[in-house]
Image (cartoon, rainbow, N blue to C red):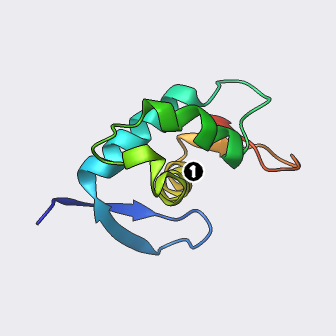
Amino acid sequence: MSEKIEVENVNVPGHTRRVDKVKYQAMRKALLSVLPKKSPGLTHKQMIAELTPKLPDDLWPGGSKAGWWSKTVQLDLEAKGLIVREAHAKPMRWTRA
């Protein structure tokens, strides 16, 4: 059984979920490496396109399920204040805090 880590969701304060720690840490590293420090940030679609090549193929063969994992990690990092959703951006965009 794999080790788990607790993640938050900025959209549901106080709600947590447990996910695979190794996958979380790999996705967190990839996501933070592609997000810019300044506006304009990346849309979710852009995030996936840029981080997928950086993901270990043994965890995400061919990028499988990278969308779900990137969204989960994005919501957690946003809840923790490590990344920021740009105000009034359409479509939504994120930068590092």
Q: In this view, does 90 lie to the left or right of 8?
A: right
Q: Is mark 1 on a helix, strand or loop?
A: helix
Seen at 66% across and 43% down, the residue is 84
On-image quarter of the N terminus: bottom left
Seen at 57% across and 73% down, the residue is 12
On-image quarter of the C terminus: top right
- Front residue of 45 and 83: 45
Seen at 60% across and 31% down, the residue is 35
Rendered image quadrant of residue 64: bottom left
Image x and y of residue 41, in percent: 73, 33
Q: Image height check: is 34 above or below 60? A: above
Q: Can residue 56 be seen in this view?
A: yes
Of all residues, the one furthest to the front in this rendering is 62
Q: What residue type is labelled 1?
A: Glu
Image x and y of residue 71, in percent: 55, 56
Q: Image height check: is 37 above or below 5? A: above
Residue where numbered disc 1 is placed: 78
- Front residue of 10 and 4: 4
Seen at 27% across and 43% down, the residue is 58
Q: Can residue 97 be seen in this view?
A: no
Of all residues, the one furthest to the left in this rendering is 1
Q: Is residue 31 left or right of residue 45?
A: left
- Front residue of 14 and 54: 54
* Number of callouts: 1
Rendered image quadrant of residue 39: top right
Image x and y of residue 82, in percent: 53, 40
- Front residue of 88 and 33: 33
Q: Residues within 10 Å of mark 1 (few under 14, many from 20)?
A: many
Q: Is residue 39 left or right of residue 32?
A: right
